[in-house]
């Protein structure tokens, strides 16, 4: 999945708007973060803690949680290895969690 594909998918969800910068775009719903491009190969996605472990176990090559994110409702998606369906699922979970 490419950063452009991530953006198109995120913006297809109701109420999602792009913010951030050209180099680090981010997509929000109701001013709450859904997904952000950390660098050209890594996304930061907000997901419910209750779903995070399942995503990590099911898609170990797609996602990870660096130590700085362990206490937060976030995970990283590694675009070079991530399954597109897994990334879309994580974005959907983030959207559902952040949508008011």
Image (cartoon, grey):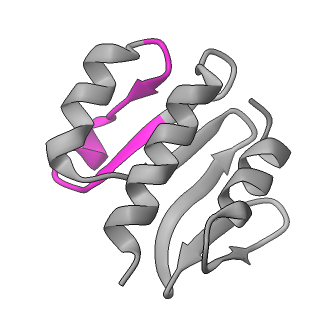
Q: Residue at x 55, y 58 (%)?
A: 35
Q: Is residue 51 magenta?
A: no
Q: Is residue 20 left or right of residue 83?
A: right
Percent x, y for residue 20? 70, 74
Q: Nearer the viewer, residue 12 or 53?
A: 12
Question: Is 89 placed left or right of 37 in the picture?
Answer: left
82 and 39: which is toward the camera = 82
Magenta residue span: 61-76
Residue 49 in the image: above or below residue 76 = below
Pick the front one: 87 or 61: 87
- For the point 14% across and 45% down, which residue is it? 50
List x then y, in percent, for residue 95: 45, 63
Task: Residue at 61%, 37% (x, y): give it.
Answer: 42
Give how far across and how far down residue 3 sits, in percent: 78, 44
Viewport quadrant of the N terminus = top right
Q: Position of residue 53 (x, y in %)?
A: 20, 30
At 45% from the left edge and 42% from the top edge, which residue is drawn?
Answer: 90
Viewer-proximal residue among 55 and 12? 12
Classify 37 as above or below 51: below
The C terminus is located in which quarter?
bottom left
Q: Is residue 22 left or right of residue 50?
A: right
Relative to 76, does residue 100 appear above or below in the rendering?
below
Mark count: 0
């Amino acid at each position: 999945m490419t950063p452009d594909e991530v953006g198109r998918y995120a913006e297809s969800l109701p109420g999602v708007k792009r913010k951030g910068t050209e180099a680090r775009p981010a997509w929000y719903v109701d001013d709450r973060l859904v997904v952000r491009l950390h660098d050209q190969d890594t996304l930061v996605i907000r997901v419910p803690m209750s779903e995070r472990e399942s995503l990590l176990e099911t898609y170990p090559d797609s996602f990870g949680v660096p130590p700085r994110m362990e206490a937060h409702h976030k995970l990283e998606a590694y675009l070079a290895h991530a399954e597109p369906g897994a990334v879309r699922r994580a974005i959907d979970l983030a959207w559902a969690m952040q949508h008011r």
